[in-house]
Image (cartoon, rainbow, N blue to C red):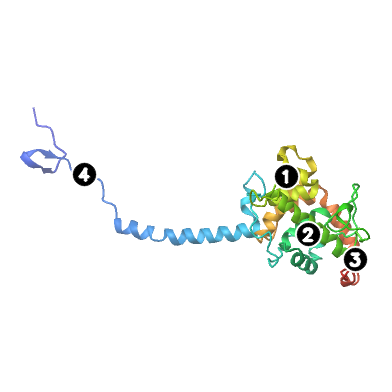
Amino acid sequence: MPPKKSTTTSKGKKGKQVRQSTLSIPDLAGIRRAFSYVPALTLLALIAFLFLNQQLGLIDLFSSGDPFEDPSAYDGIYDPDAELANLFHPAVQYWEPAIYGWAQEAHLNPNIVATIIQIESCGNPYVASPAGAQGLVQVMPLHFESGQNQLDLNTNVRAGMQHFRDCLRWSADPNFDGAIDKDPDVGVALACYNGGPSVVTIPRSEWYQESQYYYQWGTGLWGDASRGRNSSSTLSRWLQAGGVNLCNQALEVQELFSPLDALLRPE
């Protein structure tokens, strides 16, 4: 019987046949060269994503949660020198010079002032609600002193921003005992501005529906504006939900203003 053919080509110790490996050795130098580009490419990709996210709000497009990722965050809320984002409706941007002045006076970020104007009136200083709130930031009569003109621009915004500052303080002091228990909560403060101080003492699920909507619109706008974005998906949804009618009315009223400075004269 003829011997079986061997596929081996060499012998190991003690004459044992050793199978020769056909596995090729990788080019380690080439692999190292390839991986040397990874940090640079990763950095470029990160820079590109951060730029696009700032311009387009990419994270919002893929997020189904709250539009304001961390509603308790308040960094910058008390910064009156912040730059006003250009994402607000033109009827709100109309008031840009005055918004900076009101922010300085109230020691608040101009973007929170603009956020409240956007939701409350979209820039119409003569709008009124069935509940009695009036003016650019829709202030209730109880926030004015006797004899004050509720529709005077400076008086109206001054009273509104004082109320919002009170709401910020209450959001950090839900027991109303003067002891600060936590950081101010911008979302709760916005809901308080709409629904009154009682919202800081009850769970969000028990708020009136209007205050819950106000929380969503307000935190979404503030979140986008405070990040310096050029557009806001929250504003788009707000306009589609009926806000565009309010803004159209504001634009019509603003066409009658001549000059604007006359409306901003000291009280």
Residue 98: percent from left, percent from top: 80, 68
Residue identified by numbered label 1: 200
The quadrant of the image that shows the C terminus is bottom right
Circle number at residue 21:
4
Residue identified by numbered label 3: 255
Residue 172: percent from left, percent from top: 68, 50
Q: Is residue 57 left or right of residue 160?
A: left
Mark 1 vs mark 2, CA separation in Å:
30 Å
Choose mark 4 or mark 3, whichever is in front.
Answer: 3
Residue 92: percent from left, percent from top: 80, 61
Instruction: Judge the density around disc 4: few (<14), some (14-19), many (≥20) Cα neighbours within 10 Å.
Output: few
Seen at 76% across and 63% down, the residue is 106
Q: Helix or strand or loop: what does disc 2 sit on?
A: loop
Choose mark 4 or mark 1, whichever is in front.
Answer: 1
Residue identified by numbered label 2: 89
Three-letter amino acid code of the residue under disc 1? Val
